[in-house]
Amino acid sequence: MGQQGSRIKVTEADKAMLQLKMAKDELHRYSRRTETLINTERNELKGLCSRLKGKQLKEDPRARLLLKRMHYQQRLLEQCTDQIINLETMVQSIEFKLVEKSFIDGLQKGNQLLKKLNSELNLEKVENIMDAAAEQIEIQREIDDTLSNAIVGSTINDEIDKELEQLDRETNGVEKVASAPGVQDKLEQLPSTEKLGKFKASEPELEEEQPQRRAQNEPLLA
């Protein structure tokens, strides 16, 4: 089954407005009928005027009756127009008063809600909340400052170490390879080069002995 729509509540003001609008519509319909009747009687009177002349027209009962009816209907039409204007003014005034009443009701409800909120958020409570918030902000600021100083200090120390190393290289030159850890131990383990000198010194003696051996061997061959 489909959901039933919510019923619109009809107030007494709505009923009164409806009656006023219905009365205004009825007056408009009466005004249109009266205008039609006046135009019809005016056309009939014009027809009599074209047939009757002078004294005959004045003494004609139909012409006199039509003219009286036209004046009477014209007065009724004017009264109807005035009533329509009054009804329209009344309808507009009531509509404005309803809007004004709605505004006053909304203002009253808003005032009550504002009082309730003010009672819940008193001055002391707001001050406590603001103090707590300020304290937390100060703590966070101190934490940020501490972290920032630690990072900046570490960066400064690194820069100082690099500058000192640069000054050391510019002043003392490049470090020797032998000064590196472990290099001296490896050099000590290499074989000694003292015996190489003896071998090099005996090479000329061998060169001198070789011609003598050749001279001794030549007589034997002869």
Image (cartoon, grey):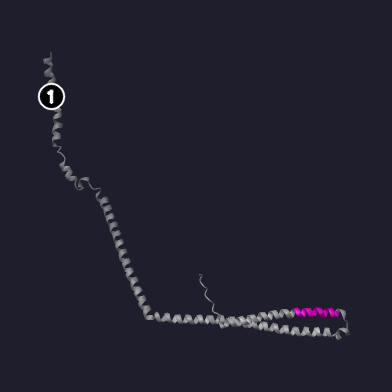
Q: Residue under circle 1?
A: 209
Q: Indicate left or right for 87 with 43 as reference.
A: left
- Determine which quarter of the picture holds residue 96: bottom right
Measured from the top left, where is residue 124 in percent x and y?
Answer: 36, 80
Quadrant, the C terminus? top left
Q: Indicate left or right for 150 with 194 as reference.
A: right
Residue farthest to the front, as pictured: 1
Give, as a single range, the part of the protein colored magenta: 36-49
Measured from the top left, where is residue 116 in percent x and y?
Answer: 42, 81
Q: Indicate left or right for 94 with 122 as reference.
A: right
Q: Which residue sits at x=68%, y=81%?
A: 27
Q: Residues within 10 Å of mark 1 (few under 14, many from 20)?
A: few
Q: Mark 1: which amino acid? A: Glu
The residue lying toward the viewer, choosing from 183 and 131, is 131
Labels in figure, total: 1
| Label 1 SS | helix
The residue lying toward the viewer, choosing from 43 and 151, is 43
Task: State whether residue 144 is above or below residue 82.
Answer: above
- Determine which quarter of the picture holds residue 118: bottom left
The residue lying toward the viewer, choosing from 134 and 51, is 51
Q: Which residue sits at x=35%, y=78%?
A: 128
Magenta stretch containing residue 45, yes or no? yes
Measured from the top left, where is residue 203 in percent x and y?
Answer: 15, 29
Measured from the top left, where is residue 170 in percent x and y?
Answer: 27, 50
Magenta stretch containing residue 38, yes or no? yes
